[in-house]
Amino acid sequence: MTSAPASTSPFREGALPYKSAGIGLATFFGSPLAGGLLLWLNERRRQDGGRPLLALTLALIVLAVSLVLAYYLPANIPAAIFTAVQMVAMALIARRVQGQAILAHTASGRPCSSDWKAVGIGLLFLVVILLVAMPLTYLGAQKLGL
């Protein structure tokens, strides 16, 4: 009796790629930089080498557009809108760029990285962002005499 050949994963043996939901969660907690890191890691884990530069470029575009919008739009627009837009944008980019590869990976019976791990990476990015932003804000306020 022969068994049907198992479908192959586009990711290297032992690789645990992040799903688009995990990338969205990392973005929610740690900005598009955290989501971009996970996109980049997924691309690096592909058997064909992937397109890691594309992943980082897309994440930086989402971050840049978000920062420009945050600067130019009125202050009465809730900050949660910007966070939600970033999260959805990164999850959609992940689905568009890596969705088929993730589906093939899971169809081959191989697991993906935990969404909780993605949340942890997002929280680490949040800590780093705060450690950088707080002193800069303090120094800026001192310079302005506030």
Image (cartoon, grey):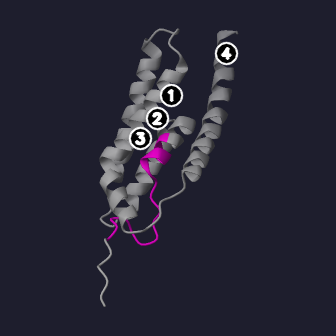
The residue beneath circle 3 is 91
Tag 1 residue: 83
Q: Which quarter of the rendered picture does the N terminus lie within? A: bottom left
Q: Residue at x 41, y 68 (%)?
A: 109
Q: Are marks 4 and 1 in contact (CB under 8 Å)?
A: no
Q: Position of residue 145 (x, y in %)?
A: 69, 9
User: Which amino acid type is marked by label 4?
Assistant: Ala
**Marks 2 and 3 close (CB-CB < 8 Å):** yes
Give the mark nearest the N terminus, 4 or 2. 2
Label 4, residues with CA under 10 Å away: few <14, some 14-19, many ≥20: few
Q: CA distance from mark 4 to mark 2?
A: 30 Å
* Label 4: which secondary element: helix
Amino acid under label 3? Ala
Q: Is residue 140 above or below residue 104?
A: above
Marks 4/2 in contact by CB < 8 Å: the verdict is no
Circle nearer the viewer, 4 or 1: 1
Earlier residue among tags 4 and 1: 1
The three-letter code of the residue at mark 2 reads Met
Q: Are marks 3 and 4 in contact (CB under 8 Å)?
A: no
Which comes before the other along the chain, label 3 or label 4? 3
Q: How many marks?
A: 4
Reading the chain from its start, which is encountered first: label 3 or label 1? 1
Q: Nearer the viewer, mark 4 or mark 2?
A: 2
Residue interval drawn in magenta: 8-24
* Residue pictured at 46% horizontal, 50% vertical: 38
Give the overall secondary structure of the magenta segment.
loop
Residue nearer the viewer, 20 or 41: 20
State the separation of the CA atoms marked 3 and 4: 36 Å
Residue 128 marker:
none
Identify the residue under disc 4: 141
Drawn side of residue 92 relative to residue 15, left or right: left
Using the image, determine if residue 56 lies above or below residue 49.
above
